[in-house]
Image: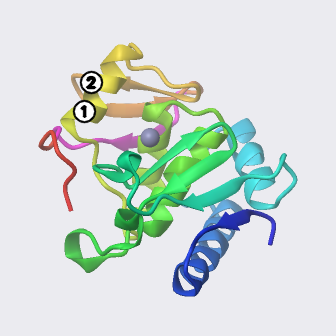
Amino acid sequence: MAIRLRGFSRTAERALGKSLSLIRQRLRHRPAPMPHDLRIALDEIVGGKRPMVTLAFGGGTEACHDLAGRTAGYRVVLCPRAFAAGKGKRIRLTAVLFHELIHVARGKELDAEAFENAWFPDEGAREPTRADWAAFAEDAYRGWWVHLDPRSRRVTDYSDRFIITFPRPTADRLVW
Ligand SMILES: [Zn+2]
């Protein structure tokens, strides 16, 4: 396995394997535009060419209190919520994992939210919350690869290609 897994159950490992192959597949047959260097970075991460990325199970840790996942450097912590069914009974795992891998590629919150929602709307993507919008504002509505017009809520990349239009922000808390 190209990516190191730590602390997951067998069932969770199988689910992760499926999510990773879906992500690899989608990087080959892209549903929407993505800047070239981001795609290369993600390819290298899921292909194991990068310094080893570790996915670790967060279990009942404090960090998992109201998060599905979080990333520091090459280490991604996935929480029980990532494996639970969300809105419409969809398992969120693929969308959560893709989001966190964009952070591994050094993407900011806006990059991660934009591509999560544009690429995995049917695999558990979650629309940005008010907390996410606060993070976007803090970054002046700019990510590494995309920017956001806060009035139209339209996200485009730096070649002006359309990525997604976000809906109006939802509640402060996570929405499931
Ligand atoms: Zn994030």
Look at the image and tell me in which quarter the C terminus lies.
bottom left
Q: What residue type is labelled 1?
A: Ala
Q: Does the magenta stretch include residue 19?
A: no
Mark 1 sits on what residue?
A: 131
Is disc 1 in contact with disc 2, using a CB cutoff of under 8 Å?
A: yes
For ligand 1, which image quadrant applies? top left
Q: Residue 150 carries which label?
A: none
Give the image location of residue 79, x and y in percent: 42, 60
- Indicate the quadrant where residue 47 lies: bottom right
By secondary structure, the bulk of the magenta-drawn segment is best described as loop
Relative to the observer, which residue lies in front, 122 or 57?
A: 57
Task: Please tell me whether residue 119 is drawn above or below residue 63 in the rendered image.
Answer: below
Q: Does the magenta stretch include residue 162?
A: yes
Q: Is mark 2 within 8 Å of ligand 1?
A: no
Cα gap from disc 1 to disc 2, whole angstroms: 5 Å
Task: Please tell me whether residue 153 is drawn above or below residue 71 in the rendered image.
Answer: above
- Indicate the quadrant where residue 54 lies: bottom right
Residue at image x 39%, y 66%? 80
Mark 2 sits on what residue?
A: 134
Task: Please tell me whether residue 143 is drawn above or below residue 61 in the rendered image.
Answer: above
Give the image location of residue 49, x and y in percent: 87, 53
Instruction: Give the residue furthest to the left.
Output: 171
Q: In this view, does 156 lie to the left or right of 7?
A: left
Task: Let me know if residue 170 appears in the view.
Answer: yes
* Region in magenta: 160-169
